[in-house]
Every structure is written in structure tokens, then in C-alpha cells.
Image: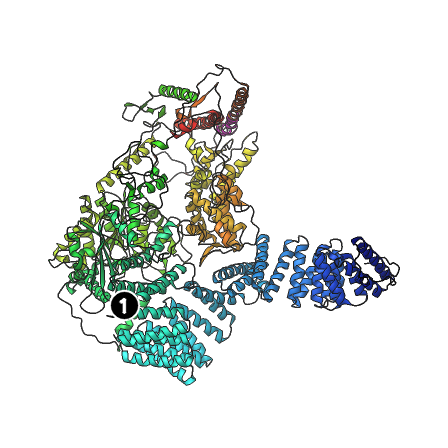
Amino acid sequence: MEFHQTLSMASLPSIADFNEPISEADEIESVRNLQKHGDSAFKSKDYAQAVTCYSEALEIDSENAQILARRAVSYIELKEFSKAGDDARLLVKLNPHVPQGHYLLAVSLDNLKEYSQAVVSFLNALRYDVKHRDQLADNVAVVASNICEFSEQALHKFEGMPPFQKLMTVGEALKVADQNAVCIEVLQTALDLQPLDSLHQQRALFLVAESHFTLGELDLAKDKYRQCLALALQAGNQQYEAKSYRKLAEISLRQNDLQQGIVYYEKLLSISNDLVSQHGEQKMTEMVGAELHKIVHETLCGAYRSMGDLPHALQHAKEHLESVAMDGDSKELLGNGHFTVASLQEAVGDYTSALEHYQSYFTATKAQKDRIGMGWSYGCLGRVYHCLCNYSLAQTYYEQQLQIAEKLGHLSMHATALRSLGDLADDSGMCEKALEYLQSYLRISRKLDEFETECKAYLRLGEVHQKNNNTEHAKYFYEQALNLADRTSQVELAQRSRCKLAYMLVTSLDEKEIAKAASLAETLVSHYEGLLKASKDNTFLKRSEIEDMLAVSYDIVQETLTSLNRTEEALEYTEANNRWEFYSIFDAQMQRPVTSGIREKEKPGGVSIVEICKLVNTVNTTVLYYALTDNSAITWVLKPGKGCIKMAKTQPCKGNCKDFIAECMHRLRSGSSRSASLVYKTEYRALPLKDSQTHNLKNKFLSLSTDKKSTEEAIVPDISPARQLYEVLVSEVAEFIDGEDKVIVIPGKDLIHLPFDVLEDQDGRLFGEKISMAVFPSLQVLQVSLGHVTEDYSNPKTLQNNEDERRANSSPVYLDHMLRVTIPPSQRPHHIVSDISYSAPMITQQEMTNPTYVAFDTNYYHKKVEGKDTVKVHEQRHAQQMTNKGSTLISETWSGQEVPTARQGQVQPYKQSAGKEYFVVVGNPYLPEKVQLHGKIWEPHSELHFAQEEAFKVAKYLNTSAIVGKEAKKDRILAELQKATLIHLAMSGSWEDSSLACSPSSTAHPMPNGSYLEEDYLLSANDILGLKLQARLVVLSCCYGDRHRELSLTLPLTLLACGVHSVLILLWAVPDEVQDKFWHHFYQELYHGISISQAVVQAKKAIRNDERFKECHLWAPFCVIGQDEVINLCQVKQAMLDQLVNSTEADILKRLQKDALNPSNASGKDAASECTFKKLGPHLAGLLLHHQHDEDILPAVLHMVRECSKLVEQPPSIPPTPHVPQGIIYSPSAIPLLNRLGFHFQPQGARNDIPYVVFPQWDPEELLPPAVQALEGVIGCSVDVHCGHALANVLECQESLISALIDVLSFTKHMPEIQLRVTDAGVGQLWSHNIARPFLGSLGFQHVGSLLMFDGTNANKKLLNAGLQSLCALMGEKGLAMLNRLDMKYLGISSKPVALRSARKTPIKSALRSASTVRTLTPSLRAYTPLPPPPPPKRLPSLNPVLLGKDQISLSTPWWSQNVKSSEMRDKMRLAKSVSDTHKEYNQYMTSAQNWYHNSVLPQADESLSKIGQPKPRPSKVKVKAGATPSCVREPVHREPELTMEAVQQRRDYANFLLHSRKADITWRHEEALKKLYLPYVQNAKQSSAT
């Protein structure tokens, strides 16, 4: 930098010496002179004088940038770098975008040896100085060489590099030198300098992220890693993709985001496997790092375990153990691996495998002489044997652990051993010994100085004292635990202590203590309900433990509130407790979030007594509501219009109330020893339990145990259990239900397994015989069931006007004589009508004395009177006249009679009216020899012969056909469930897993080991969720076996949530003969027109009258849950008969040459109006299903369609006439697909197996391009058998499902760095769909907590691209937009116009808002405004076109009968020109079709004609068919078939049909084109189309 030198101004006096004020012009002149003299001094190298002059000038103008810069340079020449730096900083502050200040600051800092800051300043100068970037980059490299060592050779290489490459090299060197802050600045400048290629961008971003990570700036590092990942995914760079995944996973786990960390690690495992397959293990290690699999599997095991996902944790623990064993690592690591696997297997209940790995862990610790490890292994082995009820062996191991802990002085192990021995003694019934061990455990825990252990010791001591009825001791220990937990902020232990203490206070006689218990319990309910809600998203919370604590809290609240006579509040809490189980099922069906149990007004579970009483008023039936606690059985009686009229609290004579009820129910279902032999005649219909092996081991050890406590035989009371239960549950409220015809019973969770109708009063009468009853688990289930019953699904108007009906039927509004709103007594208690915002209508102009009812609806005063339109009246009159001319059409029926079939000009098709009701009976589905169950191979032992016999008998009762054996496929049963009125299922199943065993679906395919997956044959509750069922009764004759199983309500409640009115189940197993008798009488009683519950009672009575089956347990278990209604079986049978008549008639008419009753639709209008998805989807699905039988079909069809597409685009002079490939003829869907695309086929001579192909001459519906695209995608998906079958199921679904799948797949493909969440609206619904979920799973999607992860292996990416390609091909405009990019405006819509729907209603928008988006999303996510309504039709008064019936258009005014205005004349001329062009265009199509026919069909005929008259070759030897005698005519083996006259005529007819069908298609499309030209001018088009 050079400055002009001037003369010295040393003799000029300083401005500061003058005290007199000077003018602004003098100041400017003085500054100019001082600057001039300073420049002169600088040129003469008198830098001190220059500084003096510049300083005096700056005293006048302190912000003069030019002078500041020159003084800074002078300071640099004087070696006063600190002062130069100060001037440079001030210069940067004044002009931050001017490079001069940054450069001077960099030079100053460089000379001050502040190299890092100097590099940053040089970089700032480089950003703003475009001309000198190369030199500045060199300066950066030179200064950086002082921080990170550069060799001379490296510096010489900089000469030929561009600036960004120099910066990249410097940045990498700085990273190696661990200068992370400077490295970030250098590389960020390189990124901002100019657009880099993708590889350099990834390298720079990764190094920047690494530097941020080293500095501990995790959020900044995560952002840069995500940017690097996005570029790597876009460029397909798997190296940086894998590195980014690994670092992102580490950051996520550090930030306790386990779900996201798991997703990144899972993706890292997938891509590492791809890298190994492509480059080898060594190259992958160089790219990603050493020992990747061991580290990742170990980390994933811990992460899944923390989330509570034990199966996945166990899977990764096994893989980590396998990696450690293969690498031959130390025995310590191997032992730790065995310990991890064993602990997880113990947690999932696989005790046998856990024992093996604990033994291996013990062996490893013993080999290492690790006494501490041996002690822990003894404790683990003892704990497993304790769980298996092998108490003697468990005690031996516990004592070994205790001895080792005492010798080593290991306090933690010592405490654990004492706790285990105390628990074992307690379970063995040795109370004193248990207390002794636990007291020692408390003493050791105090030495540990671990407050959590000490608190647990207090709680355990209190539990043992409570079990032995030492109330005061138990209360003391619970209070100690509570005080300690509150002092040490142990929140969960404090809540447990409160729960235990409140339970002890319940039995107190002091009202204050009971009130304290109530207060504690209400707090606990609020706390655990909040945790239960949070557990849906927070996987750290263990839902099962929370549910147990919540149930105990509710019991305490019920007991205390009833003791305090707060009856209604107790009922509210009871209903809130009962509805929690149904919440998850109902919300999954309705796809709305689970609400909190506590309202703003502190009402539990969102329940109020007002709502309860209003529901009772709605059903107009007395309700018996039950709750069971340890101390009493509570009963509420609710009557319509009266509310809760009685609360009864009954206690058994002695002992725990729940134990008493359980004992009575056990006696009820066990029966006497006389009838015990009959139970062995029961067919086993229960699937093996997951804990079957554990259950058998427990029984074995208990039977072999010598230390088993001897017990006296229980004294069985003389009174029957049914009568005892009646005394406790019904006798106190019997007087309040006398005279009632029907009651609704809400038994709650503890009594749902009790058949109430078998309870017996003092006179020996059964409760069910005296009164009809309907059983519901909770009032919410009743409310949902009422919604299903009252909703009319067959009436589309009901569905469209659902909101209007809700308002009209919500609450009647009555007015008194002063027109004030009043509520009649029958509607009290009531809600304020807050959801109705309409104003009350005018009643009348005259005064009324007492108006009784006013509905908020449209009345006369809301109607608008419009004037008459004379033109419209003229058009309507003309249309009516033209319509009447066609009202005498006659059709000849199959009986020979002629009937008028025209109504207002339209021929009405005849069809027999038939209902949609029918029966479905399923029994004994065929199960393969090997299936997977609970992660293991299960081999079904035998078929269910009695289930099949039962199905045939029930089908005979109902006059239908049973679905049995291999016909009872899972997909067929799912389809039948959605349409049937009454369903009877006799099959294997599991209450615990909520599943039924069907035959594998038609799309199922066995695994390599020959077994079928669970989703192939198990019909689970998740499969049923989302369906719209309309069955009025479902009979579940399944899920029972030789071992009694507690009934899980998940499967019945799922059916009720999906629309089923009632479910009939068996609470326990009964002999097959009893079942046979019951089903016979049950269905016979239903035919008599009685309700379901009464039919059950009568069937039970018939069984009870049989001397063999008098005992209660043989006939009692049949129980109905849901509505008690009458099913008219005769009406259903009549509907089935009508359906049979219709189907038979359709089959007959299809075989007739001429439809005898209905006019045939030869135009193909309905087919042409279908969307591409409906045209091609079913045919493609059929091709996929047939692909496993012949893999050459799909490629052959694709080849034919491609050739056809080329011929249509560039028609040849003579079309080719190839033969059809051999396999296509035998494919069930190939020929229909080709026919739909316009292909025809001509026989070859006398043979029909290899016909000629007649290609279509045009593609008017534009189906060929999407067909080619769809076939390419289908072929890509068919590589994987499960993916192909899942896609086949998807292609047969509705268009809305396809659209949602396209959204998810396109989003995953084009924005893979953004993570979808299952909690997002729409994504969760799609993932829970029984057809979409298998398809997504086959593509590589997995559910990790609340995230939906895509496993992005190369194979899965190919499948995703193929699946998206096939689906987009069928979705028209949206498919074209979403295949190659993510178009936001199409998210959430199907094939409708884009602007007709809001873009906010999409399953992906919430994912975009919730995800950490690293890519700029355009266009914005605002909602698209709807299109304005279409303009009104144009008027042509001189023509007045009118739309008539059968889509005919008539001109109501002759063409030249009226004077025409100029504007109308222009419209008429345009219309005439369009009509002329249309005629011309379609005439060309007709000529083309004629020529195409002659050029393609006739040559085929000529080929056969050329052989006529030619001499046939006569070989000397001919091979003939064997078996003919000499007198018979010998028939050659290879005899060529000859055409008969009939065959010749048939081929001629078909050739003519081919030509005429194509001409008819052109004619119809010609008419449609003309219609579209006239429709804009038709005034009555909307009305006519509506009619």
C-alpha cells in the first residue's frame, strides 16, 4: 500500500493549541492540510511525523476512515503493532464491510504473534476483497503455518491452487493440529467463498462439525453433521453418510435423545453392512472406524434397555456377544456379554436361557478369580431359581452370595443378598425369618449411605408387617419411608410410600385418617394418570408398573370416598379407573390423542356425575355399577331421571374381599370331583403362551419341593358360590331393581370374569332368569356402543349430514309462556346447550300462549324468494317435452313379457332389491406344519375337529356355508368381518396376545426354514383396528384350554370399538358336548325373536335340565359383552336369499348373448370414467400374486407394453404381428391388463395357445406411459417376495391409502435427513393400518419409540424407489409431481385438483414442523386458498342447448330462428369451428383404425391362406398314438389340427368384432368430445347431472 509524500508540516501549530472556536469549513480545511502533510511525511519515510499529523487530524475528525488507515500503516512501519491494531479495530467498527481494516488488523495481529486472531482477520478481509482473494489466501496459509506446521514443499503446492482449495488444505492442517476454533473459521469461509463441489462440501462440513464436537458445542456440531448427511445422501456418498450417522448417534445419546440415537445407530449398521459387501471389512474399518459392530451393538443394547424395549435390547446383546466371541477378546468382556444377555432374558421371562448365560458368566468370573463377580453370579442364579419356585436351590445360591459379601466386606452385595433372602423367606411363609433378614438389610443400607436403598428397606419391612396384619408396625415403616423419600427428593419412592400409607389408613375407624387417606389417594391418582399419559411418548416410563400403582390408588379413593359418604365422587373415580383400558383401543380406532384423566375442574378421567346420569337417561335403563376393593364390594344403583339412588357397601364375613370373590369364582368354574372328568373332553383351542415353559418348570419344582409348607385342607362351605356371590353383590340392591325388565351391569375390571346371570338368590332363582341384562366394562364402552347402534351406515345422507343431525338431536329446547328456554324434567340433569350458536327462529306473528317445542333449524323465514327466469322456464318446458317422447320404451324380459323400462327418458336397469346382511361362520383354519410364535418355531399338533364340526352345525342352523380349513385365510376373514351381520369364530386363539390363528393369507410365503411369520396367520387386535365393522354379534368360541387363563378384554373391546354391537365369549373351558348343546339352543332361541342375553339364558337352562350337566361350571361361562338386542335371523336369511338370486341371475345373464332384462353398457363409459388407479391397480396386483409361479410373466408384459407405446408414438406403415409369449396366456391377470390397454388377440390358424397380438392403434386414455412405469416398479418390488405380496394388497385398496403412502415414501426418498414420527397426524394412522404397515415394513421401515425409521440399505432403497414408482404411476398428476421431487402442494391430497384442498391437512406437515430441518423448504407451508367457483354458464339465446336424459343435448331454439348479437355470433362461430375440427379429428381416427385393422389382422389371415392348396409333406415314417387296434384309424402323435367351418366362422366373427369394437369406442369418444363443447352453454347441466 503506497501513499503520496508531501512537504513536512512540522512548523504548523497544533489545532489543539488554539482555544478560540473555529468554523466547520476551517475544520475541514485543517484536516485536509494535516492529512496532506502526514502523507508527505509518510512518503519521505518520516513515519513518526506522519503519525503526529494523522493524530492531530483525528483529534478534529475522529471517524475519518482514510486517516485512521494511514495512521495504522504508519504504526506498522514504526513497529508499534499494538497501536496499529487499535486503529484497525476502530476502522473495522466504522466500516465492517471494507477489507482494508481487516487486513491491517490481521497484519498487526500477525506481528503481535496472535496468529489465530490474525487468521480470522485475514479471512474477513478475504470475504470482502474479491480481487485479491488468491493473495489473501496465501497470507492465511503463511500465518496458519505458525500454528500448524507446514513443510516448504506443502507451501509450494499452494501456488497452483484456487483460493477455496488453499483454505481447505489449511483447515485440514488446523484440524490435525487441534486448532478447532480457527479450523471452523477457515473451513466456513471456504464454504461461503464459492459453490464447492459436493465432495469438498461434505469434507468441509464434516471437519467443521468435528471441530464443534471437540469444543463441546453439540448443537452446532449436530447441525453441521446433519448438513453433511443431507449432502451425502443426495450424492450417494456412503462414507460420509456412515460417519455422519455415527457422530449424530453419539451426540443424540449424550443429549439423552435415545430414540434418535437408536435410529442413527440402526442406519449406521445397515450402511456398514453395505460397505462391507462392496469394499470389504478392512476398507469399511478405514472409512468408519475399528470395532464398529461391537460398539454399536453394545450401545444399542443399552439404549433399547433404557427405553424399555427389551426384545430389541436382547437381540443386540446377543449380536454383541457373538462379535466378542468371534474376535477372541478377553474373558472379562466375554463374561460381561453373557451377563448382559442373561439379565435381559430374565427380564423377558426366558429363565431357562438366562440360567445358561448366568452359568457362563459364573464360569468366566471363576476363571479370572473374580470373587466379586462370582458373588453377583450366585445372586443372579438364586434369583432365577427363586422365580422358578425352586426355593431350596435359590436359598443355597443366596447364602453363597451372602458369604462372599461378608468375606469381601462388599456392602452393596451384602444388602442385595439380605434383601433376596428376606423375599425368599416371605414367599416361603417364614415371616419371622423374613423380618430378621430385612432388619439386617436396613442396617446395611444405612451403612451404604444410599437413601434409595434405605427407603426400599423401610417399604419392604412395611409390606411384610402388612401381610401379617401388623398394622401399626406397617404404618410406622411406611411413614419412615415417606419422610426419608421426601427429605432426599426420591419422587417415585415417595409416591409409593404415600400409596402404601394411604392403604393402611383406609381401614382406620378415625374419620380424620380416612380423609387423609382420601387426600393422599387423590394426589396419587393425579400423579399416576399424568405418568400414564406421558408413557405414550416417553418410553423411559414403565407403563405396566404405572398401571398397577394407578389401580391401587383408585381402589383407595373408592374405599375412602364411600366411607366418607361422598358417593358421587367415588362413582366418578370408579368410571375413570374402568375406562383407562378402553382408552388406548378407542383412540387408536378414532385416531385422536388420549386425553388426560384430570380435567381443569379436577374431575377424574374427564368424568362427571352429570355426564353419567345423562348417559343413564339416554339408555333409559337401570344401571348397576360395581367396584371391588380389598375391603368391600361397592354397588351403585342409577335410575333414569333420578340419578344415583343407592350406594351399597358389602363386606364378606372375614378376610380380603377380593380374595373372597376370587375364591368363589374359582369354585364356580372348578365344579365338583364328580364332573372333573368331563373337562378332559374339551378341545384345546388356546395358542401356546409365551411363559408356558416357565409355568411347567414352576409346577415341577413346586411338586418336587421338600420345603413346601403343609396346609390344612380348606373347608368348603355348604352354600354354593353362586349364592354367596349373590349375597355380596346383589342382595343389598335387589329391592331397587325389582320389577325391572332389563338392567345394565358395569362389573369393572375385577368382576368382568363373573357371569352375573348365574348368581342365585335364596329361592334358587337365577339372576339372569329374573331380569335381562347387558354387560359393559365401563360406561364409556356403553356410550361408544350406543353410537354404533344408532348410526345408519347404509344411508349416505346420514353420513353427509352427520353434523346437522348432531345439532338437531343434541338437546331439545323448550320455551315457556314468556319465550324463555326451559328444560323438561326428563332431560335433567343436563349440560348447558353451549354448542348451539343459532338464534331462535320466529315462531309466529300472533301471540301463542305456551309454545312447547322449538328446534334450531331453518324455517320459512330463512327462505329466499327468487323471481322467475323466463329463459329457464322455456328450457325446462322443452326438456320435459323431449323427455316425454322417450317414455314408452319397452324391454323384453326373460319370461317373454314386455314391460315399460323408461322413466323420464332414461332406461332404468332392473335389479332385485336385497339387503347386505349375511352370516359368517369360520372353524378349524388350517395351520401349516411350522409357524413362528413368540420368536420361536411352533409346530401345531393337530386340527380342531370339533371346531370344524361346530362350524358346520352352526352354518346349518343359519342356513349358510362354513369357512373351514385352507379357505379360512387371514385376508378372507378380515374381508368377511367388515360385511357380516353375525360372525361365529371357532378357532385357536390367545386372550393374552389378543390374536386368533387363521390359515396363512393368500399372499403369505414361507421363510427359508419352512415356517410362516406371525403376521401371515395371526389375526391380531391391531389388524382389526381401523376397520369399519357392522356385525351385531360376534361369537368367540376360542382361546380356552386345559390351563385356566384370565380373560383379557383387548380383543372384545377392539371389536366393540370398531362397530360390533355385542360379543359372546367363553370365560372358561367347558366340554365339547356342552358347547354343542348350547349353540343348538342359542341359535334356536334367536330364531324365536328374543334378545341375545335371553337366548343365552334359555340355552343355559336347556343345558342345566340335562342331568349330566347340572353343575354350574359346565354351563355358566357363556357371557355377552355389549348391547342386548334382538337379531332378526329370518330377515338376514331373506337378505342372503336375495343376494343369491342376484348373483345367480348375474351369472346367467353373463352367459347369454343378449341381456334379456337390462340394457348392456357397450360404450364403456363407466370404465373410461375410472381413474388410472382403478383401471390398472387390480390387474397389477394379480400379476404380482402370480409372479411367484412364473417369474417371466412380468418382464414379458412390460416388453409388450413398451413396444406398443413405441408404435403409438411413431405408427409404422405396416404394424408388426408378433405372437403372444407362452406364459402370458395362462396368467390370470396378464390378458385382462392388456385388454384394458387396448390389446386384442387373433388365433393362429387352428391353434389357440399361441395367438397373434393386435396392438392398439391409439392411446386415448393415456394409459400406456403409466402402465410402463407401474410395471417397472412392480418388477422392482417383486425381487422381494414379502414386498411384492404387500404391494399387491396395497394396489387393491382405496385411493386415499395410496395417496398417503406416496406422501410418506416421497418424503423419505427426497428428504431422508428429516425423521418422521408415529405421533404425527396421519403417519400413525398409516403405520397402524393393517395393509399399509406390512408394505412399509417390507420396504425397511421400523418403529423406534415415537419415530418411524427407514433402514436405508441399498436393497431397501431400491425397493422404496420401485414401490414409489409403481404407486406414483397410478395417481395421475400427483404421481408425476411426487416421483422425482417432493412437491409440497400435493401433500395430503389424492388425484383431485391441488387448490381444492388445504395443504395443512397432510400427514407430513407435522413431521416438517417437528423435525430439525436442515434444508430450506420451498414453497412455504401456508395453506393454499381454494379456487374461486366456476363462472356461470354462457348464454346462447339463439340456440339454448338443453341436457336431456341419457346424456343427450337438444337445441331448444332453431339455429337461425332469432336475431343474433355480434358477441353471441362470435361464440357461435367458435363453437361451430370446434365442432368441425372435432368431426375432422375423429374421422381421421376412424380411418386410422380401419387401416390398422387391414394392415395387422389381414396379414395374419394371409399367412394361413398361403398354405391352402399347397401339397402336404408325407414322411416315410409317422409316429402314432399307442393303444389302437389294427381295425381302428391310426392317429399321429404330432397331428396338426385343422380348422372346421364353425371355427372359421368364429374367427371371422371375432375379426369383425375387433374392428367394430374399436370403431364403437371411437364413436363414443367422439360423442363425448362434442358433449364437452356444448356443456359450457347448457343452463340445466347441473340439475340434469344431479337427477
Q: Position of residue 1131 (x, y in %)?
A: 23, 39
Residue 169 or 91: which is nearer the viewer?
91
Q: Is residue 409 left or right of residue 745?
A: right
Three-letter residue code for mark 1: Ile
Residue 832 or 1335: which is nearer the viewer?
832
How many marks the image carries: the answer is 1
Q: Looking at this rendering, what residue extends furthest in the top direction?
A: 1457
Residue 811 or 1247: which is nearer the viewer?
811
Q: Is residue 486 left or right of residue 1355?
A: left
Q: Position of residue 692 (x, y in %)?
A: 31, 65
Q: Was residue 1490 drawn as part of the magenta stretch in this picture? A: yes
**Is residue 153 visible in the rendered structure shown here?**
no
Q: Is residue 1259 left or right of residue 1163?
A: right
Q: Looking at this rendering, what residue extends furthest in the front direction?
A: 20
Residue 355 or 982: which is nearer the viewer?
982
In which image quadrant can residue 357 be found?
A: bottom left
Extent of the magenta region = 1487-1504
Instruction: Name the image colouring.
Output: rainbow
Q: Does dot 1 land on a helix, a strand or a loop?
A: helix
- Image quarter where the N terminus lies is bottom right
Q: Main secondary structure of the magenta part?
A: helix
Residue at label 1?
514
In which image quadrant can residue 105 be found?
A: bottom right
Q: Position of residue 47 (x, y in %)?
A: 84, 64
Q: Position of residue 1446 (x, y in %)?
A: 40, 25
Badge 1: few (under 14), some or many (20 or more) residues near its Cα, within 10 Å? many
